[in-house]
Image (cartoon, rainbow, N blue to C red):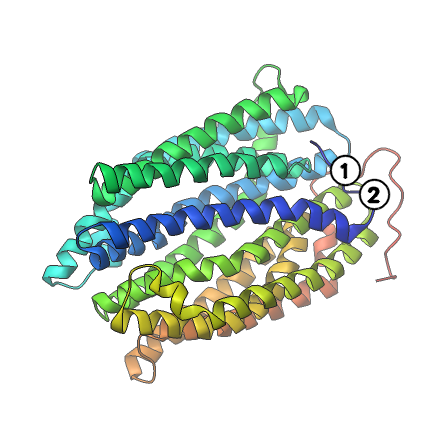
Amino acid sequence: MKKDMTRGSEWKLVLMFTLPIMAGSLLQQLYNTVDGVVVGRFVEDGKLAFAGVGICAALTFLFLAFAMGISVGVGVVVSQYFGAKKNDELAIAVDTALIMLGALGIAVSVIGYAVSPLLIDKVLTVPPTEGGAAIREYALTYIRVYCLGLVFQFIYNCISFTLRGVGDSKATLLFLLVTASLNVALDLLFVVAFHWDVAGVAWATFISQAVCMVISYIYLRRRFPFIAGGRHFDGKLCRTILRIGVPTAVQQSIVSFGNIAMQRLVNGFGEDSMAAFSAGIRINNFMFVPITGFQSGLANFTGQNIGANRLDRVKRGYRHTLLMTVSVSLAVCALLFFFARPIVSFFGLTGKPLDLGVEQVRFVAPCFIIFAVYMTLGGVLQGAGDTVLQSAATLTALAVRVVVGYVGVAVGFLGYSAAWITLPIGWVFALVITNIRYYTGGWKKKAVVGPARGAPPDAGEGAD
C-alpha cells in the first residue's frame, strides 16, 4: 500500500515505514548467516569452507553495493515525484529504471563471472598453503555461481527502492520472508542431503534470488496500476537517476574495494584470522540492520517532504529518527557485546579463530553508535538528492581506515586487529563532514523536482 509521508506524526511515519525494512534486512542477514553455519558445520573441511565463502563477502558486497547505489537514484526520483503528486512522470521514471537496471544487471553478471578468478587470485589473495589452496577453490566455486544471479539482484533492488519511494515497505518484507525460507530449505537440501558442499549454498542463493525477483516484479505490476501500461524509456529521466545514483554507486563500490583491501590485509595473517574475520563480519552486519533501516526510512520521508516543500517536517523527522536510531542501536550492540562468544561459536569456530572473532565483535559493538549518528544524517542527504556530499564523507572514512590500517601493520603497531580498530576512526571523519553539510543547509538546494501544485511554503526556514 502506498504511503503519503507528507502529513502526520513524523516519528510514527518513519518508524512504521522502517520496521518492515529492518525486518527484511534481518531476514537477509539470517539467511546469509545460515549459509555460513551450514557450510561451517556440514562441509567436511568446515573451517576452510567457511573461510572460502567468507572471503567472498567483500566481493559480493561490491556487486550488491553497485546495484543499490544506482537504485538509490531510483528511490530519490520516485519519492520526490510521488510527494509532488506528479504521477505521469513517476510512471515513466519507474519503467525507465527497470529497463536500465535490467540491462546493467546482465552486463555485470557476465563481467563478474568472467573476472571472478582474477578477483580471487590477484585481488583478495590467500595464503600459499595447502589450506589456502582449498579456501581458494571454495571461494571460486561460490563466487562464480553467485555472479550468475546478479541480474536478479539488480532488478529486485530497483523494484524495492521504487516501492519504498511510494511508501510501501511492507511488500519487500514479504518478498524477503519467502526468499529467506526458500534459501534456508535449499541450503539444507543441497548441502546436507545432496552433499554439494559450497556449491550447494551458492545455488540455493541463486534460486532464491530469482524467485524473489519474479514475485516482486509481479507485485509491482499488479499492485500499482499507474505503471501497468506499456514500457517507457526516457533519456532525461535516465540521466537524472544516474546523476543521483552514480555517486552513491561509486561511493559504495569504492567502500567495497576498501573492504576488499581490509580482507586482503586479514588474509595475510593466515587461515585462523580469515575464519575469525568472516564470522565477525557476519555478526557485525546485524548491527547494521536498525541503522540502515532508519536511514532508508528517513531518506524516503525526506524525499517526499522535499517534493511537497516541507523542510520543517524534514528537520523534525531527522531529530526524532536520530533518537530512535541511537536507542535501538544501543540495545542491539549491548546484546552482541555480552553474548559475543556463544554467537561466534555458532559458526563452528573453536580455539584461536573463536577468540579472535570474539575480540573483534566486542571492540566494534560500542563504536556503532558513531555510525548510527552518521548514517541518520546520511538519510537526510540521500533523500534530498545530495548524494555527492554523502559519497565524499564515506570515501573520506574509507581512505582514513585503509591508510591507518596498512600503515599500522607496516610499522608494526597494529596486527590483525587493524581490520576493525580503524572503523570508528573513519566514521568520526565522515560524521564531521555530514554535520557541516546539514547545518550549513546546502542539502536544501538539491531537490530533483519542484514542489507539488498547491504545496504550502516551507514553514521551517529559520525555525529549526
For image coordinates 45% across by 75% down, the residue present is 363
The quarter of the image holding the C terminus is bottom right
Q: Are marks 2 and 1 in contact (CB under 8 Å)?
A: yes
State the image coordinates of residue 319 (x, y, percent, origin top left): 75, 61
258 lies above or below 182:
below
For image coordinates 87% across by 61% down, the residue present is 462
Q: Quadrant of residue 151?
A: top left
State the image coordinates of residue 105 (x, y, percent, origin top left): 41, 34
35 lies above or below 400:
above
Q: Nearer the viewer, residue 444 or 147?
A: 147
Residue 302 visible in the current orientation:
no
Disc 2 from disc 1: Cα separation: 7 Å
Secondary structure type for disc 2: loop
Q: Quadrant of residue 442?
A: bottom right
State the image coordinates of residue 196 (x, y, percent, origin top left): 21, 39
Query: What amino acid type should be assigned to the residue bearing mark 1?
Result: Asp
Label placed on residue 456 = none
For image coordinates 65% across by 38% down, the residue present is 165
379 lies above or below 264:
above
Secondary structure type for disc 1: loop
Image-based side of 360 in relation to 170, left or right:
left
Q: Nearer the viewer, residue 109 or 157?
A: 157
Q: Residue furthest left?
A: 130
> Residue at label 1?
4
> Residue at label 2?
7
Query: What amino acid type should be assigned to the residue bearing mark 2?
Result: Arg
The quarter of the image holding the N terminus is top right
Specify few, some or many for label 2: CA neighbours under 10 Å numbering under 14, 14-19, or 20 or more: few
Specify few, some or many for label 1: CA neighbours under 10 Å numbering under 14, 14-19, or 20 or more: some
For image coordinates 49% across by 67% down, the residue present is 336
State the image coordinates of residue 222 (x, y, percent, origin top left): 61, 20
Q: Nearer the viewer, residue 42 or 435?
A: 42
